Image: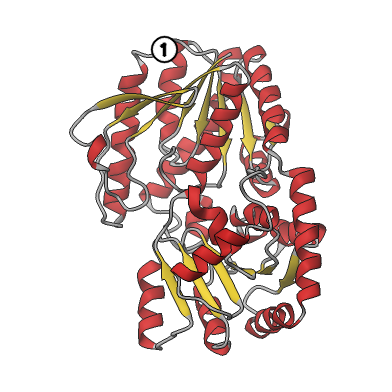
Amino acid sequence: MRIWFLTQFYTPEIGAAAVRLSRLANALAADAHQVTVLTSVPNYSAGVIPPEYRGRLAIREKIGAVDIQRVWVYATPSRSNAARILNQLTFMFMAALAGIFLPRPDVIIVESHPLFVCLTAGWLKRIKRAPLVLNVSDLWPESAVATGALRAGSLIVRMAQLVERWAYQDASVIVGMTEGVVEGINRVDHRPDRVKFIPNAVDLDRFRPGLEAERRSMRQQWGLADPFTVLHVGNLSLTYDFDLILDVAAALPQFAFVFVGGGSQGESVKERVRRENLSNVILVDAMPHAVMPGVWAAADACIIALRDHSVAGGTRPAKLYEALATGTPVVAAIRGEGQALVEASGAGMVVPIGDRAAAISSLVCYAENPELRRKASRKGRAYAEQYFSPERARLAWTAVLEQARRRPSSAESR
């Protein structure tokens, strides 16, 4: 097949979407499909375009077997809503223009976040006469309202809800990455036969236990000698309860807590660490994905703490997949789908959301019981091998793409 990916995020960016989509694009290209990615110049999440991509409206390049068409976007380090929306709108218009000149695909995979990219997808679908597969990793704007990032009933939320409903209607097939996302789509669209559940995958060759040289190197880089080390990796967003994690860090000064990543809560986390002089907390900016296996190897446990918002029950934090693959024991303040995943895998301990004492007790238990850590490590790795291999995801996606080629969207059928 001739497959397009329409996404604002792609390698060399280091966010979860960029990593996931580049892995899938490479897997499909390796399976003899012709893959083209229509994306922006790199700028996420720092808001800075690298020098080699500046000053040009469009850039063609090839990474591996994947053809990439990049377009200019407005980028700024500002984290204001206005700056973020302008960044998204410029990609929407620039990608719509650039797509006109690309060869017609058999099918278009659309990453639905940011949601307004779906408008570009609808335009390109019509001029290229190609079916859409909509990939939904997050129920937006529902999740933004639930976490307090946006106000319910605001103009942007009302606009987003209209686009969301239209995008679901316009797609031939919709892929939800969690069961909670699938349920949310079905509440809006009411045609479950078009909605498929395909969970995330993880590179099991790169992310694995036993990387001792990488562990030593990374711990030396962070100035760590012997302390039991707890890791939080990924976006510092409103989804997570950093008050709880920092309370746990303050209660366990003999442990090291390493935060790797940036995001909207980054400044407040830094401010509290400075204000309370939490010398056992190490803050590290987002790192290239190529070095992340070493980051996981340096940790003795991982902590995940969700805030108690309405979409928490349908959340599977992306970091969970790499934690399982690397055999890193997890302490998770989580419920619903994420809780079920941790418990089914045996990869960690689940505590109630907001329960600081239980999180502290669980980490102490892991620190004092190496055999318990080894057991969680073995179970987590085995579960990842069974359910989250890239090959399993490739086969599921190939079936979805074939279905999309055979089946028009409901809008087309009318």
Q: Residue furthest front?
A: 213
The residue lying at 36 percent from left, 86 percent from top is 275
The residue lying at 50 percent from left, 58 percent from top is 234
Residue 16's place in the image compared with 11, above or below, is below
Residue 407's place in the image compared with 357, above or below, is above
Q: Does the rendering let one see residue 372? A: yes
The spot of residue 97 in percent (x, y) is 30, 21
The spot of residue 187 in percent (x, y) is 65, 43
| Residue count near mark 1 (Cα–Cα under 10 Å), binned few <14, some 14–19, many ≥20 | few
Instruction: Indicate the quadrant containing the N terminus: top left, top right, bottom left or bottom right.
Output: top right
Q: Which residue is mark 1?
A: 127
Residue 69's place in the image compared with 281, above or below, is above
Instruction: Indicate the quadrant containing the C terminus: top left, top right, bottom left or bottom right.
Output: top right
Camera-nearest residue between 354 and 292: 292
Q: Amino acid at mark 1?
A: Ile
Camera-nearest residue between 402 and 308: 402
